[in-house]
Image (cartoon, coloured by chain):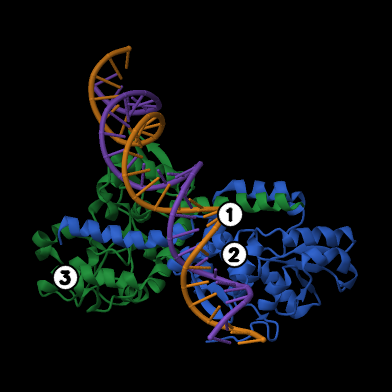
Chain colours: A blue, B green, C purple, D orange
Amino acid sequence: MRKAQREAYKARLFGQFAQIGRALAGARRLELLELLAQGERGVEELARASGMSVANTSQHLQVLRQARLVEARKQGLHVRYRLADEKVFALWQALRDLGRDRLAELDRLAAEFFQERHEFEPVTMAELRRRLKEERVVVLDVRPEEEYAAGHIAGAVSLPVEEMPRRLPEVPRGPEVVAYCRGPWCLLADQAVHELRGAGIPARRLEAGFPDWKAKRYPVEAEAGAGKTEQR
Amino acid sequence: MRKAQREAYKARLFGQFAQIGRALAGARRLELLELLAQGERGVEELARASGMSVANTSQHLQVLRQARLVEARKQGLHVRYRLADEKVFALWQALRDLGRDRLAELDRLAAEFFQERHEFEPVTMAELRRRLKEERVVVLDVRPEEEYAAGHIAGAVSLPVEEMPRRLPEVPRGPEVVAYCRGPWCLLADQAVHELRGAGIPARRLEAGFPDWKAKRYPVEAEAGAGKTEQR
DNA sequence: GGACTATTCAAGCACTCAATTGAATACTTG
DNA sequence: CAAGTATTCAATTGAGTGCTTGAATAGTCC
């Protein structure tokens, strides 16, 4: 094999991997991946949830699709996107966890925006799993309702954090409330814990989010009829 | 927490992760990561192995260092770089494996440059591990000598693929020779197998490379005194 | 079949990135 | 301390990226 040929192979090989790398190189795209890890979503929905224009959202989705990280399917008038594979979440998770270990900046960032973050130890997933079997424990899903509908921890109750102030009386009492949201860096659960403790309800957050729980193959459930026609 | 504040948090949070993503977004940088996964190397050495200019190599290494994927230490006149963490290889592995599953292009690419690639099933790592304990099996490390010196599969013999033609008679005879190199997409092992079979020696390649073996905590060894002063 | 609408495409802007070249830095070694 | 060298920095070029705006497409739904 000639030298030039080897160079060409190398360039094309690593070029292919770099295409996936490029898809991970934009903050907005990572945000979309995190949202899609919660479940299948439409373009307009994703645009609203991320605060981007629809056109921009669509373009980022194209980049993710070209890298084969997400897949699209048409449903009625809408196009719904989802992660192409469980391994896509695994990749995002590997990136996320490497970031936690290596970028001290991140902890400072979370602390700056939510001081109380480190006052209480989060509940580990293994611990919650055990307590769900053995004890009575109240688990709150504080993500927006659509995400709860697309899938949630088995036994969890939906209480989106925006509705928390007026629905506080509904919170079932128990020895402790555990709140969770999208992932370890998502502040929704932290905010929920803040409000619950403010109302005198003992609460802590789960260390990670729903996609992490699902990836561990811990029990999940979905709203009946939420996915409409779950094709394929 | 105000809306603008949430936006700022999101942007900075995902921005941090995107910085790591950007480091993975260039083919040359991925190539450097693959080389560094074999062991610690100097700048000039990396430049030679990758076919880049020294200045360009240095600049890419800076990008990797800013993303905290690699670390540098001075040794005499040289600066030696290494992966910052085992998790960095895990991330590269996740990217690589996702690529294999999702980019059909890759298989076509490898086949185009090395037609015989799919004629013989590669040996799995678990199988080689078992056979190393139970049977007599000849394991050839066909990477350049420095990489062998920095670490190799316990019991493997060094025979860089460039020297194979003239050192073929040295190859110890056995029921089968297993050749390995840097990773599943590295063609050095394929070329070695080609030459061995051409000489009538039964041979197959290992499915993956040395870093994968090491990550599995299978037994490895390093050349005595190869790492010079193995600090910390 | 015609109106409607979710999504994508296309063009344009400011900005960032990859690679080259040549010079500067920092360190060792005699 | 002076010479020498491995590495990094700085400046430049051309290509590529992210986001916006406005139009086109391709479907549904009545």
Residue at the spot x=23%, y=79% of the render?
B120
Q: Nearer the viewer, residue D29 or B29?
A: D29
**Chain letter, disc 2 residue:** A
- Tag 3, which secondary structure? helix
Question: Pointers 2 and 1 in contact (CB under 8 A)?
Answer: yes
Above or below — where is B36 with respect to A158? above
In percent of width and height, residue A95 lies at 52, 59
Which is more N-terminal, label 1 or label 3?
1
In this orientation, does residue B193 appear?
yes
Q: Where is residue A85? Give x, y as percent.
A: 50, 74
Q: CA distance from mark 2 to mark 1?
A: 10 Å
Instruction: Give the alpha-carbon distance from disc 3 to disc 1, as whole Å.
Output: 46 Å
Q: What amino acid does circle 2 point to?
A: Glu
Placement of the N terminus of chain A among the 4 image quadrants: bottom left
Quick one: SS at disc 2?
A: helix
Dot in front, 3 or 1: 1
Looking at the rendered structure, the kind of residue marked 3 is His
Within 10 Å of disc 3 (Cα), the crowding (few <14, some 14-19, many 20+) is: some
Q: Name the residue tied to disc 1.
A: B14
The quadrant where residue B181 appears: bottom left
Query: Residue A34 — which label?
Result: 2
Same chain under badges 2 and 1? The reply is: no
Q: Residue at point 66% right, 46% down?
A: A108
- Residue B213 in the figure: left or right of residue C8: left
Q: Amino acid at mark 1?
A: Phe
Name the spot of residue B211 as percent of width and height, x first.
37, 61
Chain letter behind tag 1: B
Does the image show residue B85?
no
The percent position of residue D4, horizontal first and vertical second, equals 23, 25
Rendering quarter of residue B144? bottom left
Task: Please give the name of the residue rendered at 67% of the width and 69% of the height, measured from the top-left corner.
Answer: A125
